[in-house]
Amino acid sequence: MRRFLFLVFINLGVSIFAQSYQRNIGETKELFVERLKPIQNSEIQGEVLEVNQWNSLVKPVFAFYEYSEPGIENGKKNGLNYTYVDGYIFAPVANNRYAKIFIDTYAEEGATAYIESVFFANADKDLDKELGVLVSWDQSRHYGMSGKLYQVYFYDYPKLISKNIKLKPIEIKKFKMEFDGTNDAGEKSGAIFNTTSKIKAELKRLGF
């Protein structure tokens, strides 16, 4: 595919160059992100989302790619494979062209990361809504354990779209990794923030 530098305007008329990708006429969001997958052996995980708007970004497409890579120790392969999930936003810029924005990489935590939900909520002091990604890891394959780990991640809204842009993470100490289930000692625990509605309610309680 032919790629080139494209002048992008977003928020307050500020402009900066960004690489862009053509979406073919009539091409579904699924075929579009499949064609642009960053790693050849990756597979799209879950639903490809095309939302109406995220602040001033109109109809961005969200896609998450699952892939495996060999583990490396001391510069050599250790014989193990590790699975990762990479998230991307494809942001429309003009004339059916999209800029690709990297969200984050979600590594294994005893199992492959699974994207439970993608949502928007105010998570800092500005007026823009931030991106929230709720991730889980199934722990049931471990002996004597059943349940999931949960972690929510927050990312700042991109004021500019530029080449090789990556979203800036926002840390909120209140939201830590939680286990919901029974551990190998038979002890039960519950996760407080394992749904979007619970997370949004807590953000409002915190004053965001």
Image (cartoon, rainbow, N blue to C red):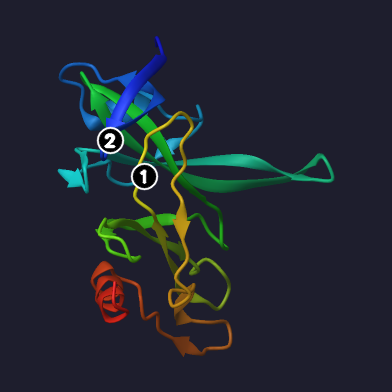
The reply to whether the C-beta atoms of the residues labelled 1 and 2 are less than 8 Å apart is: yes
Give coordinates of residue 80: x percent, y percent.
69, 47
Q: Looking at the image, how many numbered discs can be counted on the residues?
A: 2
Which amino acid lies under the numbered mark 2 shown in the image of this protein?
Ile
Of residues 158 and 21, which is closer to you in this image? 158
As displayed, is residue 147 above or below residue 59? below
Residue 106's spot in the image, x, y percent? 50, 52
- Residue ranking furthest to the top: 2
Q: Kindly state the secondary structure of the residue where label 2 is placed.
A: strand
Residue at the (62%, 40%) spot, across then down: 69
On the picture, is 72 further left or further right than 144? right
Rendered image quadrant of residue 68 = top right
- Residue closer to the observer: 123 or 159: 159
Q: Earlier in the sequence, mark 1 or mark 2?
A: 2
Where, quadrant-wise, is the N terminus in this rendering? top left
Position of residue 163 relative to residue 205, above or below, is: above
Relative horizontal placement of residue 112, taking residue 59 as reference (left or right): right
